[in-house]
Image (cartoon, rainbow, N blue to C red):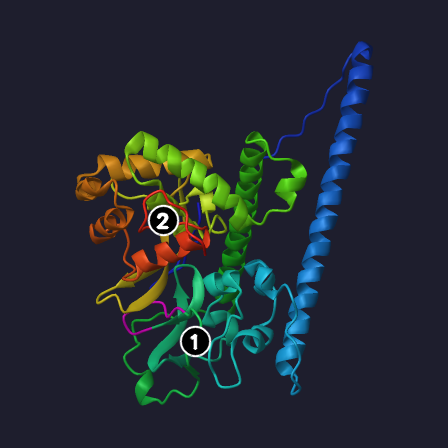
Amino acid sequence: MNHFYNTFGKTNDWGCFVYRDAPEKNDVVDAEAQEQSDEDLSKGQIDKMDKAQESRNYQKTINKMIEHLESEEAKEAPEGFGAIPASEFLNRTQEELKTLFVTKEGAIDFHGNEGARRYVGMGDLFVSKQRFIKMNGIVGKRSIANGKVGYVDKGGSYLAIFGGEKIDLDVSESEQSGFESIQEFSAEEEGMAKDEFKNKVEQDEKALEEMRESMRKLLSDQGLSKEEIDNMGTQEMFGMIGKLMAQQVEEKYGIPWEVCLAQSALESGYGKKALGNNFFGVKAMGNYAGKTQEFLTTEYWGDKSKASKMVDKFRAYDSIADSFNDYGQLLSNSSRYAGAFQYKHDPRRFLETVIASGYATDPNYVSKAEGALRHLGYSLNNSHESVTT
């Protein structure tokens, strides 16, 4: 279970040694087993070496990006920066991250890296002695919220950054008043929280890699060769698998496959953010008793003009198919979404009704979902018809 800090306080196997005295007749079997074990160990070592080399390559790209940003000369930004996993950034110093993601004008810029945009916060960019900060004019005090070191407003809400925010480190004494209820943490406590958060990010990345392997297996089952699959990116793999799954959902539950595909593409980032095989951002609420997981998400509250990052509990699934099937059951079995089914042959109206019924808090959800669908070559306007992007 993951333990997360909040602004008002914090939460803080046996191994078995097996020996045997096997009879001589089992010596050959034992030797074969040991040989197989050695082969497995060698493969594990090779995988570990490959991962270490990959990490070194990422770090080299980060170094090149830092040099590019620090240089007074106009140099071309290094290729591959956008593909670097967030965990690689969380291993860097605050000064380096500040150079990477805070412009000389004081604005946040993630340079197209979605992992950094999702997981890097102001607590990673500024040192602990920077107790107060202003983001777009909103004053925040350094603390720990939902397991993330960062800055919170007077109400205890985490100040999230998405890119484009203006940061001001000059906060007057009068602006620092009213934060008495916001707990401060020691450097040691911050370090522990950062280590725990980084471990969670690494677990998330490992889970996503396992999900991508599942997609590769599904494509192989559809008759694609290893070479064809190796030449496909995650988005292309998702396009094929997602459409197949969405059409099965339509056949079983009557939900337009365009709607299903659009929502899964948006919610999962074309499969790049489908933690726990959750392709639809379905939360673990109410009487749900299945597998769950916790991760950072973006929500819109109040007048829905301001986005915020928060840790929430979501459903987790054993397979991609289970996620699509659960989505179909959720919409078809809930009275909340019953009104949408009068528009089975009108994908746009169907999706608009689902969102208006409370599926998501993003006020621009429908347009974003349609944009995601168009990237795959389809539209909400023309039912079951492909369009040219």
In the rendered image, the vertical position of residue 205 relative to residue 81, given as above or below = above
The image quadrant of residue 138 is bottom left
The answer to whether 8 appears left or right of 128 in the picture is: left
Tag 1 residue: 164
User: Is residue 155 one of those drawn in magenta?
Assistant: yes
How far apart, in angstroms, are the residues tagged by discs 1 and 2? 26 Å
Q: Which residues are magenta?
A: 153-160
Q: Amino acid at mark 1?
A: Gly
Answer left or right for 78 relative to 358: right
Residue 323 in view here: no
Q: Is residue 22 magenta?
A: no
Name the spot of residue 139 as percent of width and height, x first.
Answer: 34, 80
Image coordinates of residue 28 in percent, x first then y, are 82, 16
Secondary element type, mark 2: helix
Locate residue 29, reporting x and y percent. Answer: 78, 16
Q: Secondary structure at mark 1?
A: loop
Residue 263, numbered circle = 2
- Label 1 neighbour load within 10 Å: few <14, some 14-19, many 20+: some
The answer, for residue 271, to whether it is visible in the render is yes
Q: Residue at x 58, y 78 (%)?
A: 99
Q: Residue at x 75, y 44 (%)?
A: 46
Callout in the foreground (1, 2): 2
Depth check: give the residue in front, 380 or 135.
380
Q: Nearer the viewer, residue 17 or 357?
A: 357
Up-down relation of residue 321 to residue 133 (above or below)? above
The amino acid pointed to by label 2 is Gln
The percent position of residue 234, horizontal first and vertical second, equals: 55, 49
